[in-house]
């Protein structure tokens, strides 16, 4: 639910502008507010899971998300919708790290790879199928249903969690790191706000980008220095986990992969929409081969990771993604759909063997009481890297468009009441589309290089099955 909601709402942006008579900048806050709330609450999740128990916190997160969804569907202004999206984000931010913690504890270290393969389905397929679901719901019903659909799912999740999840055994004595919270959560929110503002500002040098991102970085740096040198008894985020080599290498690999994958996830539908003139629903359906490829390899990768370690699996997966991404560097105005869909399928095959084995490598060697903190750390890394990747590719693509005079003329014509009839020369349209396709090809070169760089940390991942931690507790089996 929480991952789908990021991309589902992106499809509804034009609808919100029309319904609420709001500007694109105002409507964009329905996405930005959700992302900032999600990022701000993730650091608290590890502490809260240890303090109150994963079952209680998971049920609270589902209730917050479902309640926020209901309120979003009742909003009658863009300001109300943004406020309710923040409430949704507070619940959504806790769902993934808590889900990871619950499942990895239940499975035990020998089965974490298979568990990560299960968790990888929404993480990889959410950005692919979100536009399909959003476009379909808006077409057949109304924008309200992109939120209302969460209510029955949330109700089933709450009932199932109450019946199946084991009773909590929290440690109430653990103190809360208030100073850490005041440094890290606002720091992450401000940094991500600055980075998320880059596409709208169209430059990194905007005061809105630089000032907020710089303040955020200062707060995060202060948190890191305090954690390393003052070492609070129960830190909000345990940086001592970086002493674990497998986790440290996995964080680097995850950062590079998330930047490339989530950044490229923006490019694929944009190419089909802007260059090929497809509808939102058609563009989403054209991405299906990527999801099919990932679904084929993900279960196999999970089983193999448990048996032989993640290193060989991740190296193979990244290599396959590089091949598929490199195919997209050659896109044009009339590139064969067979070629494009084949490239997406190849990339999907590689993605199924990359992201979750990296997560497995990070969590497989952690002790039971470290899993909540480790999964929180990986989710923060993924969120930051994804935001940076999205902003980076948005700016590169925009700059590529701005360098073309034909694209500028096409945009001016489309903004006029006469539309395409305002074009002074009929040859401008094919030239503009060709220049746009070239811009996409150039950005895909950057994406290919970023994915290839993932091979550097990947070769340092364990290539044999890691040993379970010495003091690892027995797995907590589900009822």
Image (spheres, rainbow, N blue to C red):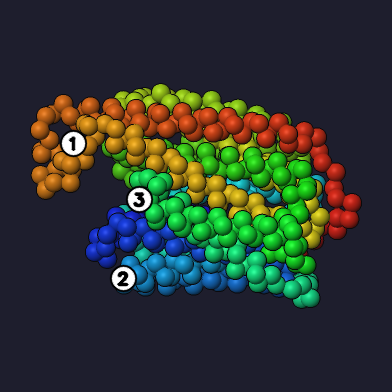
The numbered mark at residue 77 is 2
In the rendered structure, the answer to whether residue 295 lies left or right of residue 175 reads left
On the image, the x and y values in percent for residue 196 come to 44, 52
Residue at image point 36% right, 57% down: 28
Residue neighbourhood size for the residue with mark 1, other residues' Cα within 10 Å, grouped as few (<14), some (14–19), many (≥20): some
Q: Are marks 1 and 2 in contact (CB under 8 Å)?
A: no
Residue at image point 78% right, 48% down: 243
Task: Tell me the CA gap for discs 1 and 2.
Answer: 34 Å
The earlier-in-sequence mark between 1 and 2 is: 2
In the rendered structure, the answer to whether residue 87 lies left or right of residue 274 reads right
| Residue matched to label 1 | 409
**Which of pointers 3 and 2 indicates the residue nearer the eye?**
3
On the image, the x and y values in percent for residue 198 come to 40, 49
On the image, the x and y values in percent for residue 431 come to 23, 27
The earlier-in-sequence mark between 1 and 3 is: 3
Residue in the foreground of this view, choosing between 360 and 39 = 39
Residue in the foreground of this view, choosing between 311 and 67 = 311
Task: Tell me the CA gap for discs 1 and 3.
Answer: 20 Å
Residue in the foreground of this view, choosing between 3 and 188 = 188
* Above or below for 369 versus 115: below
Residue neighbourhood size for the residue with mark 3, other residues' Cα within 10 Å, grouped as few (<14), some (14–19), many (≥20): some
Task: Tell me the CA gap for discs 3 and 2.
Answer: 22 Å
On the image, the x and y values in percent for residue 307 come to 79, 37
The numbered mark at residue 200 is 3
Residue at image point 31% right, 70% down: 77
Q: Secondary structure at mark 1?
A: helix
Residue 340 seen anywhere in this rendered image of the structure: no
Residue at image point 40% right, 47% down: 205
The earlier-in-sequence mark between 3 and 2 is: 2
* Above or below for 37 versus 251: below
Q: Secondary structure at mark 3?
A: helix
């Amino acid at each position: 639910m929480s991952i789908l909601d990021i991309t589902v709402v992106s499809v509804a942006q034009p609808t919100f502008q029309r319904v609420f008579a709001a500007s694109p900048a105002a409507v964009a806050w329905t996405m930005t507010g959700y992302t900032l709330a999600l990022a701000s609450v993730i650091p608290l999740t590890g502490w809260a899971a240890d303090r109150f128990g994963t079952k209680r916190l998971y049920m609270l997160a589902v209730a917050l998300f479902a309640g926020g969804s209901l309120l979003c569907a009742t909003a009658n202004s863009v300001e109300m919708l943004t406020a309710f999206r923040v409430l949704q984000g507070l619940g959504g931010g806790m769902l993934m790290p808590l889900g990871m913690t619950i499942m990895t504890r239940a499975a035990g270290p020998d089965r974490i790879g298979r568990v990560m393969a299960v968790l990888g389905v929404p993480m990889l397929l959410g950005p692919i199928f979100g536009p399909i679901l959003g476009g379909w719901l808006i077409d057949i019903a109304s924008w309200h249903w992109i939120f209302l659909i969460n209510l029955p799912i949330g109700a089933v999740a709450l009932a199932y969690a109450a019946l199946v999840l084991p009773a909590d055994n929290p440690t109430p004595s653990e103190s809360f790191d208030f100073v850490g919270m005041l440094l890290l959560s606002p720091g992450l929110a401000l940094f991500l706000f600055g980075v998320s503002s880059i596409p709208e500002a169209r430059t990194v040098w905007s005061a809105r980008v630089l000032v907020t991102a710089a303040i955020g970085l200062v707060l995060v740096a202060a948190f890191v220095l305090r954690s390393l040198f003052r070492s609070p008894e129960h830190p909000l985020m345990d940086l001592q986990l970086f002493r674990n080599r497998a986790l440290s290498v996995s964080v680097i690999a995850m950062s590079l992969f998330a930047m490339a994958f989530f950044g490229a996830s923006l490019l694929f539908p944009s190419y089909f929409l802007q260059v090929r003139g497809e509808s939102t629903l058609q563009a989403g359906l054209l991405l299906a081969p990527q999801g099919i490829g990932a679904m084929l390899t993900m279960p196999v990768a999970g089983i193999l990771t448990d048996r032989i370690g993640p290193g060989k699996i991740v190296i193979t997966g990244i290599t396959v993604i590089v091949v598929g991404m490199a195919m997209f560097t050659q896109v044009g105005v009339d590139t064969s759909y067979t070629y494009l869909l084949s490239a997406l399928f190849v990339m999907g095959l590689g993605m199924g063997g990359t992201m979750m084995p990296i997560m497995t490598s990070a969590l497989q060697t952690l002790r039971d009481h470290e899993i909540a903190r480790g999964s929180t750390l990986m989710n923060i890394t993924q969120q930051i890297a994804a935001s940076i990747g999205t902003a980076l590719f948005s700016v590169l693509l925009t700059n590529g468009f701005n360098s073309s005079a034909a694209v500028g003329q096409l945009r001016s014509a489309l903004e006029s009441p006469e539309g395409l009839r305002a074009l002074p020369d009929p040859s401008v349209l094919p030239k503009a589309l060709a220049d746009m396709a070239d811009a996409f090809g150039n950005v895909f070169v950057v994406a290919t290089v970023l994915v290839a760089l993932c091979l550097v940390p990947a070769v340092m991942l364990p290539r044999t099955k890691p040993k379970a931690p010495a003091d690892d507790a027995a797995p907590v089996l589900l009822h």
